[in-house]
Image: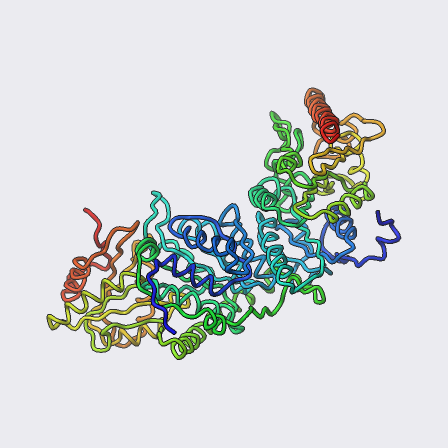
Amino acid sequence: MVKVVAKTGNEAMAEAMRQINPDVVAAYPITPATEIVMIFAKYVADGLVDTEFVAVESEHSAMSACVGASAAGGRVMTGTSSQGLVYMYEILPIASSLRLPIVMCDVNRAISGPINIHCDHSDTMAAQDFGWIQMFSENSQEAYDGLIQAIRIAEDPRLRLPTMVTTDGFIISHCMDKIELLDDADVKNFIGAERKAADSLLNLDKPVTIGLIDLQDYYFEHRCQVADAMKNAKQVILEVADEFAKKFGRKYGLIDGYLLDDAEYVVVALGSTCGTAKVVVDEMRAKGVKAGLLKIRVFRPFPAEEIAAALSKAKAVAILDRSDTWSAQGGHVFTEVRSGMFDLKARPKMINYIYGLGGREINLEHLRQVFGDLQNVDKQPLVQYLGVRE
Amino acid sequence: MANLKELSKRQEPLTGGHRLCPGCGASIVVRQVLLASKDPVVVVSATGCLEVSTTIFPYAAWKVPFLHNAFENAAATMSGVEAYYQFLKRKGKTSQHINFVAFGGDGGTYDIGLQSLSGAMERGHDFTYVCYNNQAYMNTGIQRSSATPKGANTTTEPAGKVKQGKTMSRKDLTEIMVAHDLPYVAQATVGNWADLTRKAEKAFSIRGPKFMNVLQPCRLGWAYKPEDTAAIGRIAAETCFWPLYEVENGIYKITKPREKKPVAEFLKTQERFRHLFKPGNEKIIEDIQADVDRRWQALLAKEEMTAKAAK
């Protein structure tokens, strides 16, 4: 039975965590992700979950405890944002290298400095190289559905990769939205009653040594195993999404298009901005402009082939980045998309907009400007900062 | 307490053939602590000499379950292991008692791992944290830590023409752990095996967070002959440079030496203090002696005070 409720992004993620009922959660408060942990702690206090909740003294310890609990065989989750994620960075590649399927709620927030609590994607984007699967959400529903799917994806024996599901700080995390909830039993059946770990530190009959030192003779091979797992991830993500769609009706891809098939002028974006862009695409279409949107839902692994195929017929593409690489050559998404398009015989002209840093609003007018620019793409610089004051 | 015959029959937790230095005290700490457990043990180790020397892939010296995560987070990592174990117990999925033991050197414990340690101890996880304390960053080549004693020669605070090694006194981590109001805190040394084994047994008999600070002579960093490790550990206790004591539920109990020897007896056994015996440096040794005496008197006073309070 479909249950429609109003929930903020944080409430939706906390609700998914209640239904997932992980064995261990270790987390530390940080705006705007704190609420997820607070709501979940109340679930623990009220006996609504079986979880051992470890209220650690830092995000570094949160991720460290997650590694310990996951190496011991548990189904483990955490939540964080911004500086908290940055503080975890040291341990993130250890989690992926040890092939521990930890699942994280990451509420996107700008990173210091200056200190800022509002949305951009800098925190997640700077974590792109740590061997974690990364899935962005356009709204609370996607965050809720994505988190449930993430357990299956992370624990798949072909992957065993940690996975983060993100929402846009405040824009999704704190805004009330209509979402459809699944039944508790359906969630439990979908994810399986418990994690089936290949090895466990607590297996006393077969003692294992985990986290050995690898030198010139083995490190490379072990790192390449993570690369191989990440190569398998696209297929696993799609399989899980297909099963989810069959059971619950909501379909997700690695990328999702909006009026994309015949689009000449395309905006590429992630997260909540996609909702705003769809409104402007509709406006453009009403004016006879063949506008479209390509939403990237999965950023790691990067769906380069799918993006190249989807954009191959476009005339001009604007890639929107809510983060900067500080390379003076554009943002993270731009760099990846442009590289992914390189082998196409005929490429559309591609330009980059870095927007919304530190929660700077992106509104319909900004997107109208982008679609206007695309129709005069030859006159545009490679990289522009959208919505910044001169 | 288990006698040597009983200990010799227990499962060896750490095999020979690892790459620790000849005469290294770290493996002695590990074996004497883990052999004191009648129940299965699960080990977490910080990055450091012990970890790199016992786990060079594809070889592992550990006969018991072992996890290494990073340098500063052995305590936090163990928090997660122990949390999952508590989950399993609460759900009736296991009834097997396990003694969880985290090992970290002084760098990974006193310095970079202090926050992780403090947090885990405050949260009350049921495990024993053992600091194998060799008073410097030995794995990276004898750099000073906050556990390095005054006057010691290290590669980042060396003895030179105008400086005579470390100028500051060492941090007293054992007392910092006592201030966490833990059910059990102990100081021990390599070379007093019966004392160390008894303290480990005691730690394993208590539920909750336990901390053991074990002084571990390091033949490389302290610079002495490999066969002297145990003797140097003993003289550290006999001079009260490293008093043997334990604090159970706030009550101090000191294992006092028969005769308190001058600290110079300890200092002269090691090259790291050799410069202190040059003419003109007498005052430094006097200061070290005064520091040892002051700390020893304070410890005796705490024992007396807490014994009274207990009555």
Residue A302 figure quarter: bottom left
Outermost residue toward the left?
Answer: A287
Q: Can residue A336 be seen in this view?
A: no
Residue at point 68% right, 41% down?
B183
Left or right: A314, with A298 as reference point? left
Q: Is residue B293 above or below residue B206?
A: above
The quadrant of the picture occupied by the C terminus of chain B is: top right
A171 with respect to B106 (left or right): left
Q: Is residue A22 left or right of residue B239?
A: left
Choose top left, top right, bottom left or bottom right for residue B121. top right
Q: Where is residue B135 in the image (x, y as percent from the top left)?
A: 67, 38
**How many discs appear?**
0
- Give the color scheme: rainbow, by chain, secondary structure or one colour: rainbow
Query: In the picture, residue A334 is in which quadrant?
Result: bottom left
Residue B26 visible, this orientation: yes
Measuring from the top left, give residue A56's x and y in whole percent: 53, 48
Residue B191's spot in the image, x, y percent?
80, 41
Front residue of A303 and B221: A303
Question: Going 77% across and 47% down the picture, which residue do you hit?
Answer: B201
Question: Vertical placement of A154 versus A213: above or below?
Answer: below
